[in-house]
């Protein structure tokens, strides 16, 4: 039963986030800056959801285990450094892959978990146009697949620990993947004008989340004693993405009103995962 729930949740997070991203793009998100919901709002929402999931749900569950807290804190530290090095490796890879004068080369910020993104398009990550047309978007799809596989493993570890944790983790993954999938769709649409083709390709990459969930389920079942460590690694992933990838994009010179909106959407993300966690706990 739990395996079926994991498959459904990972598909909802992996493919659902792609469809939400496509719907928001077709609704004109990002074209009219300052009107309605914009990319900055989504990034704030995602950062709040990830931080709340890590600090309010995953870490408390891990520290309820009999494992020495110092060992868990060490795991958290190692996880943060690992994702930092992964980001560095991705930056180095793209620094050699793209020409120095390619758009966004100097200031691009790749997403962690080998999720390559470069310059911003309407406030959302995307590759430079030259790289997109040369590679046909396959670099993005490869990075997306690896990233989604990792998300699936993290979601599975949360579900094995507790159904409530799994639902909260799946929701957080869905929310934070939306702005990144928007960037992926932009990249693929630059090399292929057919929106449906781009949507299908990114959806297939998103479906890899379910594969990670299934393999993660069987792996964690065999390593039940290591479940708290899996939860801490998931937490380090969420914290790193929020603090190193999402929040830096929000650090811009804005008006007082725009800053207030950012903060409100950040808290909205925290409230969202808290409410979902409470509802799942009661049911």
Image: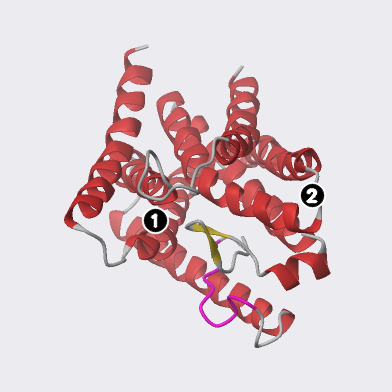
From the viewer's perspective, is residue 255 above or below residue 234?
below
Q: Which portion, as a residue range, is magenta?
A: 103-112
Judging from the image, what secondary structure is the residue with disc 1 in? helix
Where's the C terminus, which quadrant?
top left
Where's the N terminus, which quadrant?
top right
Q: Is residue 111 visible?
A: no
Query: What separation in Å lies between label 1 and label 2 (alpha carbons)?
Result: 32 Å
Measuring from the top left, give residue 214's x and y in whole percent. 68, 35
Queried whether the magenta region covers residue 109, the answer comes back as yes
* Dot 2 alpha-carbon crowd within 10 angstroms: few under 14, some 14 to 19, many 20 or more: few
Identify residue for label 1.
242
From the viewer's perspective, is residue 83 above or below residue 11?
below
Q: Residue furthest bottom?
A: 100
At 55% from the left edge and 77% from the top edge, which residue is drawn? 88
* Dot 1 alpha-carbon crowd within 10 angstroms: few under 14, some 14 to 19, many 20 or more: many
Q: Nearer the viewer, residue 178 or 111?
A: 178
Q: Nearer the viewer, residue 147 or 155?
A: 147
Q: Is residue 9 visible?
A: yes
From the viewer's perspective, is residue 95 above or below residue 200?
below
Single out the mark in the foreground, 1 or 2: 2
Queried whether the magenta region covers residue 259, the answer comes back as no
Q: Examine the residues drawn in magenta and state their main secondary structure.
A: loop
Identify residue for label 2.
193
């Amino acid at each position: 039963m739990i395996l079926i729930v994991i498959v459904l949740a990972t598909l909802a997070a992996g493919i659902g986030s792609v469809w939400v991203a496509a719907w928001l793009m077709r609704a004109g998100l990002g074209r009219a800056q300052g009107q309605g919901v914009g990319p900055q709002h989504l990034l704030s929402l995602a950062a709040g959801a990830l931080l709340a999931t890590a600090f309010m749900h995953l870490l408390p569950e891990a520290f309820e285990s009999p494992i020495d807290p110092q060992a868990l804190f060490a795991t958290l530290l190692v996880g943060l450094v690992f994702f930092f090095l992964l980001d560095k490796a991705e930056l180095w890879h793209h620094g050699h892959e793209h020409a120095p004068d390619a758009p966004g080369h100097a200031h691009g910020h790749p997403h962690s978990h080998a999720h390559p993104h470069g310059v911003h398009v309407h406030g959302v990550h995307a590759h430079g146009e030259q790289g997109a047309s040369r590679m046909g978007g396959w670099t993005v799809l490869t990075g997306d697949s690896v990233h989604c596989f990792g998300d699936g493993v993290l979601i599975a570890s949360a579900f094995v620990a507790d159904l409530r944790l799994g639902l909260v983790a799946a929701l957080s993954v869905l929310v934070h993947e939306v702005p990144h999938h928007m960037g992926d769709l932009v990249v693929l649409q630059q090399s292929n004008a057919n929106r449906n083709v781009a949507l299908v390709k990114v959806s297939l990459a998103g479906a890899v989340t379910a594969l990670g969930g299934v393999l993660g389920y069987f792996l964690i079942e065999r390593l039940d004693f290591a479940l708290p460590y899996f939860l801490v690694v998931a937490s380090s992933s969420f914290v790193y993405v929020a603090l190193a990838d999402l929040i830096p994009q929000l650090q811009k010179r804005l008006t007082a009103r725009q800053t207030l909106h950012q903060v409100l959407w950040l808290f909205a993300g925290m409230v969202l995962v808290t409410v979902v966690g409470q509802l799942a706990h009661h049911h």
